Image (cartoon, grey):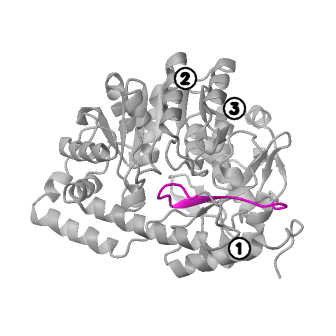
Amino acid sequence: MHLENLTQSGGKPRSRDLVRGIAEAIARERLKPGERLPPQRDLAHSLGIAVGTVGRAYAELESAGLIAAHVGRGTFVVGPASRGGRGGSIPDAAGVETESPEPERAKCEIDLLTYRVPIPGLPGLVAETLREIADDGGERHLLDNSPAEGDARHRAAMSAWLKEHGLAVDPASIVLTNGGQHAAVAAISTITHPGETIATEELTDPRMKAVAGYLDRRLAGVPCDADGMIPEALEELCRKRRIAAIYCTPRNQNPMNTTMPAARRIAIAGIAETHDLPIVESDIYGTLCRHDDIPIAAIAPHRTHFLSSLGRIAGPGMKVGCLVSPPAHVVLSRQGVGMSTGTVTRLSAEIATRWIMNGRIVELAEWQRNDIRRRVALVRGLPMLRNARTGDMSAHIWLTLPEPWRSEEFVDGATAHGVAISPTHNFAVGRLDAPHAVRLVISAPRTHGELHRGLNRLERLLRTQPRPHGTTAA
């Protein structure tokens, strides 16, 4: 099928038009699973648009699990039901995510794919805090305009929270954001330019891939080991290619669950110093860690942009994050936040501030640590899973698959057994072949019993032989 016919008529298509058109064609099976898509440059030429526009669309579709790029082979349709059994979330023209039709999704009653915060009583806690705000007369203030960087009181609370996690910063260096991804967009958009290349882990957060695609930035993967990004590999990359910035996740990296020791963080900072590169340090997955190792932002504060978020503690609906920038860059960071989705939502920031100041955020974090300990114990109790990398109070685990399993075969098998897990190629940077491993989000099931059932199914699956591609479980 010609992709030129998939986009909206009347002018040159935009990136979101391509995403919508290709996604709908996949959902209606006008594009079949396994069908090869044209190279980005060829499609851009035929449509009369920029290569970056096609690149952003492909990156968004790959992040949604609808297409996959393979080294030396090209980009192929995965299908309306992704290999994770959950299909893809398709951003519509308004930016709202809608689910594509998924014939296989009904089988996946156990979700090990989606990040959740299964804290009982959380809605009641939110309601209680809202009543407190109303009793204080604070709701009137929350309806006013707020500064681009966020209210001073809210930034002071965030500064106090960051200090408890090993990063002492002046509130003036903090810009509040609507979550971690908002902070990433603001940072990347102000320290790099379209077409430039950012070094990151060879397996990285799919949302970082989406941010890079949206902003027309390229990613270069850096090999990693059990301690995260390898400094020697980063140094070699910086010598051989023109790198504009370094993006890394030192704690509980998604998906590999690596945590950099202090010596490695110092080495990464040293390489950035040698090549005069800014660093974007994401701590979104490290907010529950027990051991507060020194952040790179404390080692190289003059060149590091630090991202954090309360979403992993207070739930994904609590879109309160922050971007800590070098003092000389704070004004640009404010502009980056304002030009993306605007300033932080004052109501969410007020709730977060009250929870930080009254200790509720500490209670929520400790509840989750205890819950994760119990969930990890379930993993450790299964022989085929006990060697998974669990991280430090991480909500996900990284499971290296035994011979002869390949990652895509295992994801297919899990789907057939009603367990949804993420396609590993979603994390791969560029055309890197995905390793024979999978990420499992152990916080996704709402109960320990549901998690145990899902893990037992995967344990039994690992004791079998892979089925030929395209067959289903009996």
Characterize the magenta stretch by its predominant secondary structure. loop
Tell me the residue that label 1 is attached to.
Answer: 459
Q: Are dots 3 and 2 in contact, CB under 8 Å?
A: no
Q: Using a 10 Å C-alpha cutoff, classify the residue at mark 2 as few (fewer than 14 neighbours), some (14 to 19) or many (20 or more).
A: some
User: What residue lies at 41% left-to-right and 26% top-to-bottom?
Assistant: 300
Tell me the residue that label 3 is attached to.
Answer: 51
- The disc placed on residue 271 is 2
User: What residue lies at 69% left-to-right and 19% top-to-bottom?
Assistant: 240
Residue 328 horizontal side relative to residue 21, left or right:
left
User: What residue lies at 32% left-to-right and 27% top-to-bottom?
Assistant: 331
Instruction: Estimate the spatial distance between the alpha carbons at disc 3 and disc 2, rounded to whole Å.
Output: 31 Å
Q: Is residue 209 above or below residue 112?
A: above
Coordinates of residue 217 in the picture (x, y in percent): 59, 32
Q: Secondary structure at mark 2?
A: helix
Amino acid marked by disc 3: Val
Coordinates of residue 325 in the picture (x, y in percent): 36, 31
Amino acid marked by disc 1: Glu
The quadrant in which residue 170 appears is top left
The answer to which of marks 3 and 2 sits earlier in the sequence is 3
Q: Secondary structure at mark 1?
A: helix
* Residue 388 falls within the magenta-colored stretch: no
Amino acid marked by disc 2: Ile
